């Protein structure tokens, strides 16, 4: 099996002696739409475990250097023509290791189920599933190849196209712990309200405080009617205009709405700015698509580099490969991805099945 390093998105091959599974083990099957939605929501490959529940049927125990174990799982993505590959399912060759806080919680939940039902967590040799380490800490920022005793790096060219696309769809390292859900966690909003309330109280105290003598009256400022605006010649080289447009658009990449608003503002300046803004977006769209298309050919880019380009553009592998039109096609694709991410925050969690022993 393959291990996806959560720090660099590099692929490593694991020795069979480093893996333990149950006799009824099988990967968790999810649709491509669910996989894309969960990958957008999860900030790490292991973060997918925050939305998919571990059960004794899908646990994969990975041996660590100190002969303890970490827990992970395998995903099998059901493919129905969303990507240019012929595979009906892909991704089951990869082991996705959970963050320590999540697999420790899963272990405690399973132990409670064992206590109540009197069952056992079985592996292939009939022994109990090795419990995860309760004191494990990754050597790097997240779980990676340095945490396992035997791992061989696999060149990207040795992977199949489906495996490259699966690895590039992961979103890289984020937080090693479960992240807050904006749909149910109102801590940030409450802190903002308290901060605003304290500011209003502070301003009220300042207004009620005794005032100091007013300084001598200054000369009145000229009224707007008396201010005259001159007509300056606006003639800049195309390279300078393109640099200005690119910096302005880069500052508005937070959302498709802000990017579209900034693009329209640039295009209303003059024809030169209109051409520069359209050319900037068109070049970015081309770079993103070329990065994803490289995964389909004989000279693929590393999945980590492809994901960095996708993360900066706010797109997914599927939407990037579908780009073929003018610049506003990118804005439409970006808006569709944001809609998927928003839907994932509301109902992106997969149904939690009961613990089956």
Image: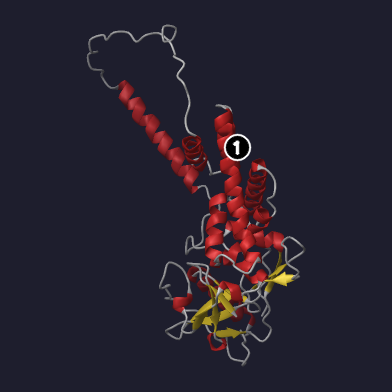
Residue 26 lies, in percent from the top left, at 68, 79
Answer above or below: position of 230 versus 120: above
On the question of residue 266 being in view, the answer is: no
Tell me which residue sits at (59%, 66%) in the image: 300
Answer above or below: position of 90 versus 344: below
If the image is split into quadrants, where does the C terminus sit? Answer: bottom right
* SS class, disc 1: helix
Kindly identify which residue carries mark 1: 260
Residue 155 lies, in percent from the top left, at 55, 75
Residue 8 appears left or right of 94:
left
Tell me which residue sits at (59%, 73%) in the image: 157
Front-lying residue, 10 or 218: 10
Residue lying furthest bottom: 125
Residue 271 lies, in percent from the top left, at 58, 29
Residue 314 appears left or right of 340:
left
Front-lying residue, 53 or 247: 247
Q: In which quadrant of the rendered view does residue 89 lie?
A: bottom right
Q: Residues within 10 Å of mark 1 (few under 14, many from 20)?
A: some
Residue 338 lies, in percent from the top left, at 62, 48
Tell me which residue sits at (25%, 19%) in the image: 210
């Amino acid at each position: 099996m393959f291990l996806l390093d959560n720090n660099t998105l590099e692929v490593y091959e694991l020795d069979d002696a480093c893996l333990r599974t149950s006799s009824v083990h099988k990967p968790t099957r999810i649709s491509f739409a669910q996989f894309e939605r969960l990958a957008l929501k999860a900030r790490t490959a292991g973060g997918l475990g925050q939305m998919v529940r571990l059960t004794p049927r899908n646990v994969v125990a990975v041996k660590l250097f100190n002969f303890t174990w970490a827990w992970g799982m395998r995903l099998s993505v059901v493919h129905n023509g969303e990507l240019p590959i012929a595979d009906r399912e892909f991704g089951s060759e990869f082991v996705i290791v959970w963050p320590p806080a999540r697999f420790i919680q899963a272990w405690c939940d399973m132990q409670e189920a064992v206590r109540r039902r009197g069952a056992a967590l079985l592996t292939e040799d009939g022994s109990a599933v090795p419990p995860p380490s309760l004191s494990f800490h990754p050597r790097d920022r997240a779980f990676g190849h340095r945490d396992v005793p035997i791992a061989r790096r696999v060149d990207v060219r040795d992977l199949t196209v489906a495996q490259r696309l699966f690895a590039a769809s992961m979103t890289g390292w984020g937080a090693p712990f479960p992240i807050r859900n904006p749909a149910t966690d109102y801590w940030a909003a409450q802190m903002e309200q308290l901060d605003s309330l304290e500011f209003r109280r502070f301003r009220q105290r300042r207004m009620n405080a005794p005032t100091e003598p007013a300084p001598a009256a200054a000369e009145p400022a000229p009224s707007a009617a008396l201010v005259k605006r001159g007509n300056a010649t606006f003639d800049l080289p195309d390279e300078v205009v393109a640099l200005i447009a690119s910096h302005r658009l880069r500052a508005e990449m937070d959302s498709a709405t802000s990017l579209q608003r900034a693009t329209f503002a640039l295009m209303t300046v003059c024809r030169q700015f209109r051409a520069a803004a359209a050319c900037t977006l068109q070049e970015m769209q081309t770079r993103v698509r070329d990065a994803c298309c490289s995964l389909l050919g004989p000279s693929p880019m590393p999945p980590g580099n492809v994901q960095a380009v996708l993360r900066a553009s706010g797109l997914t592998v599927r939407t990037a490969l579908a780009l073929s039109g003018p610049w506003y096609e990118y804005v439409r694709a970006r808006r569709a991805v944001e809609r998927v991410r928003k839907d994932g925050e509301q109902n992106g969690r997969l149904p939690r099945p009961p613990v089956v022993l």
